[in-house]
Image (cartoon, rainbow, N blue to C red):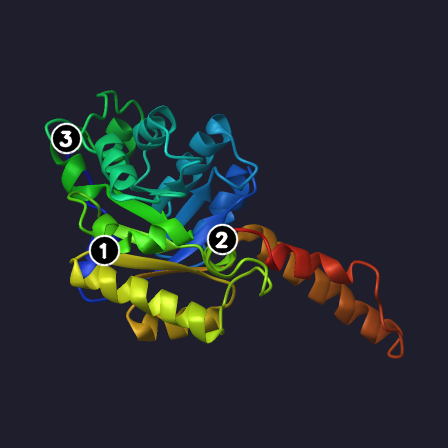
Amino acid sequence: MKMHRNPIRKIWSEGGGVINGWLSIPSPFCAEIMASCGYDSVTIDTQHGAIGYDAMVGMLQALRASGVAPMVRAPWLEPGAIMKTLDAGAWGVICPMVNSRADAERLVSYVRYPPHGCRSFGPTRANFALGGDYAAVADEEVLCFAMIETAEAMNNLEEIVQTPGLDGVYVGPADLTLGLTGRRYRTGFDRDEPEMLEAIHRIRTTAHTAGIRMGLHNGSASYAAKALSWGCDLVTISNDVRLLAQAAQESVAEARRLIAPDHSPTEGAGVLQQTSQASY
């Protein structure tokens, strides 16, 4: 069986932007539901999500039937975790806290087989999920994203994006805001502060100048659409936790309004705000 080709690369080759979903709940059924909702790709978050390796594999299996491109955010820049993620059948890896050219080079080496890297050979599930010729073409198809989310990474941005084998950078606005401004602003996504907008645009421009892609985590569809208009190549819209909390809260609020129009519920009102400020 020949390897399937990475759907994300296909979209980019046709000049399109990728709409990405995000999974933090350790549930194959939740992954299956999200995969049916029209995303181009869906990322399983093993850093901040409540997801271990066994749950991740089941979620990758659930995503397979949909044709959605599965990716995984690794828990850290650690070779064993990254290599097992790829062996399990992820089309790409997003790695947090890449702060220097040396970090980026290590990341690439964990994603690529020799002579381009030091990835150990053993694509146990990838051979079945992605094709029997996986080893021959994996270096060309699997995506390697470094997260830019600290002041140190911003200082080293030009060197990071020049790393051979790196396909793109991914921006986590919550951590980036903390890294660049401390606690002067609220945490969360959809930044509108001039200095944060300047930082996001600088990352995009610098990445594109180096010939690689840029992804951005967003809290709303409207901001994601705006990011695509700026030229971002991949946009994540919220995540399963926030979508569930928002839909549930809106449903309960609507029911209470219809039952008692003058009732103004306060219980649980902070839940959505808390989930919107989670670090990504």
Question: Mark 1: which amino acid?
Answer: Glu
Foreground pick, 1 / 145: 145
Question: Mark 2: which amino acid?
Answer: Asp
First along the sequence among labels 2 and 1: 1
Of marks 2 and 1, the one in the foreground: 1
Q: Which residue is drawn at 35% across and 50% down?
A: 153
Pointer 2 residue: 175
Q: Residue at x 47, y 54 (%)?
A: 179
Give the structural element (helix, strand or loop) at label 1.
helix
Q: Is residue 67 visible?
A: no
Q: Can residue 176 be seen in this view?
A: yes
Give the structural element (helix, strand or loop) at label 3.
loop
Foreground pick, 91 / 46: 46
Location of residue 131 in the rendering, given as x and y in whole percent from the top left corner: 21, 33
Q: Residues within 10 Å of mark 2 (few under 14, many from 20)?
A: many
Question: Mark 3: which amino acid?
Answer: Asp
Foreground pick, 220 / 32: 220
Are discs 2 and 1 less than 8 Å apart at CB? Answer: no
Query: Tag on residue 158?
Result: 1
- Label 1, label 3: how far apart the Cα atoms are: 35 Å
Foreground pick, 254 / 180: 180
Say left or right for 279 vs 138: right
Location of residue 145 in the rendering, given as x and y in whole percent from the top left corner: 30, 47
Say left or right for 245 vs 143: right
- Label 2, label 3: how far apart the Cα atoms are: 38 Å
Pointer 3 residue: 133
Location of residue 161 in the rendering, given as x and y in whole percent from the top left corner: 22, 52
Say left or right for 54 vs 15: right
Of marks 1 and 3, the one in the foreground: 1
Q: In which quarter of the image is residue 274?
A: bottom right
First along the sequence among labels 2 and 3: 3
First along the sequence among labels 1 and 3: 3
